[in-house]
Image: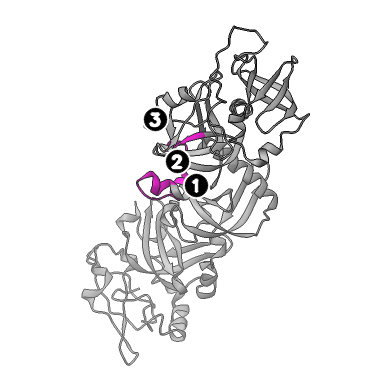
Amino acid sequence: MEQSELGKTEEHNHSSAELSEQAMADAPQSADEPVAVDAAPATEDSTPNPPADNSTPAAVVDVGYKRGELVDGVIVSTSPTSITIQLANGREGIIPNSELERMDVKRLEDFVVGKPLKVVVVNPYNRQGQTILSYTLALEELDWLEAASYQASKEIYHSKISGYNKGGLIVRFGRLRGFLPHSQISETRLAASEGETPEQRYTQMINQPISVKVMEVDRDRNRLILSERAAMREVRQQRKSSLINELKVGEEREGTVVSLENFGAFVDIGGAEGLVHVTEITHKHITHPNQALKVGQKVRVRVINIDSAKNRIGLSIKALESDPWDEVVARYQRGMLVRGTITKLTKFGAFARIEGDDDQEVEGLIHISELSDERVEHPSAVVKRGDVLTLRVIKLDVAEKRLGLSIKQVNSAEFLDEDLAFAFEHPDRVAIPTPAPTTTSKREGAPLKSAPASGVSTPASGVSTSASGVSTPANEENTPANEENTPPAAANGSEEN
């Protein structure tokens, strides 16, 4: 025989042949086999052994039934010591007192005259000429047949976890105990378990509900192998179908991130998973969900799409966050100067991040044609990641949420009047421009363009404001024109327009 539940629960393999109590006591045991499955019930009214019948038949008599056969019968009489059953061929058999003693009162009260029931033939014909029957073995045999039916149909069986051993969990299947190997426990359940020993990992799982599929039924070897992982895929689809009928677009739910993919994050919102596409995770620019989320993280989401035909749920996290573009619209307009940090270079330009209030971040594109007055083969010839520059807003598309920036138009005379007006209105954000001296570009070794006739520079110039509020020209040594990575068109107030 085999053992499970850490080798503490004796396993009994009820074959179709009669087993005497002494034979059961002498049966070998193995406490180390991890796939042992107990076919014997653990309830108080169970009969772990078939009814004892030590008598030897005087002669072989064919009564029409074989040992271990499952047959139909009807109760014809009851007594405190036995139940008499009439079988289909008219012969009578008895359920002996040795089995009745192990039953509880409720079970005994169910035995009423005229009630049909199934029994297993333990001994077709003993010395007294009696046919010995077992009701307990019949119940177990029916469970084995049901398990085989579930395996064939691939249906999901719902039960509870009743115990564990060193190899996995023990799950009730009627009066049988099926074995759920550790490798077949769902990822969700494993993620909730902690510890290195079976006691630490599995104790908290006892009595928890579980859904499984039957993977193997071997009556002769007393093996019933189950899988939660195989069932979970179908369970999730069933739950999702049910949830889709309840959900409404715009509804908000609490959820848990269960997995991260290149295209987005799957979030469990109550037994079913929805997809948060990578573009719906945050208003910030990210290339992978792991830059903003992690598995197990609790999040609040909004339902933005429901596809009943494809059984899909679309979710959004950023829909519940304030949109930084609301701040951009209120704070910036075309022609304004902003400070930006270069975040990414592409063959068609460079992306720069500007900051709004509350640390909300918005990125804009500096097209390659707006990097310099001169032809640029690649943005890396003018800027690099991490550069902090003064930039001109040249395009603001609220509908498409696109921000166009420019370096070469920072010192453009076209925006001189707007720069001066803004500087006087917001002295805390842009220094008031003053005439800047002519300087020479160290990169080109030639004078830059002359300043406009007005003799004043734009607010993008590298002027500094003294405590008195009067701006003075910036020192030539500190101007970006001396830096190797600053394009001529982006040089500040030390150059002339």
State left or right for residue 211 relative to residue 416.
right
Closer to the camera in the image, 125 or 410: 125
Q: Quadrant of residue 384?
A: bottom left
Residue type pointed to by label 1 = Ile
Residue at x 39% of width, y 38% of height: 166
On the image, the x and y values in percent for residue 75 come to 74, 27
On the image, the x and y values in percent for residue 131 come to 65, 18
- Badge 1 crowding class, 10 Å Cα cut-off, few under 14, some 14 to 19, many 20 or more, is some
- Range covered by the magenta-colored residues: 178-202
> Which label's residue is closer to the chain start, 1 or 3?
3
Q: CA distance from mark 1 to mark 3?
A: 21 Å
Q: Which disc number belongs to residue 33? A: 3
Q: Which residue is mark 2?
A: 164
Residue type pointed to by label 2 = Tyr
Relative to 87, is 99 above or below? Answer: below
Q: Circle 2 sits in a helix, a strand or a loop, which is it?
A: strand
Q: Which residue is mark 1?
A: 206
> Which label's residue is closer to the chain start, 2 or 1?
2
Residue at x 38% of width, y 79% of height: 453
Residue 198 is a magenta residue: yes
Q: Residue furthest bottom?
A: 468
State left or right for residue 390 relative to residue 71.
left
Q: Circle 1 sits in a helix, a strand or a loop, which is it?
A: loop
- Badge 2 crowding class, 10 Å Cα cut-off, few under 14, some 14 to 19, many 20 or more, is many
Q: CA distance from mark 2 to mark 3?
A: 13 Å
Res 419 visible: yes
Residue at x 48% of width, y 72% of height: 335
Image quadrant containing the N terminus: top left
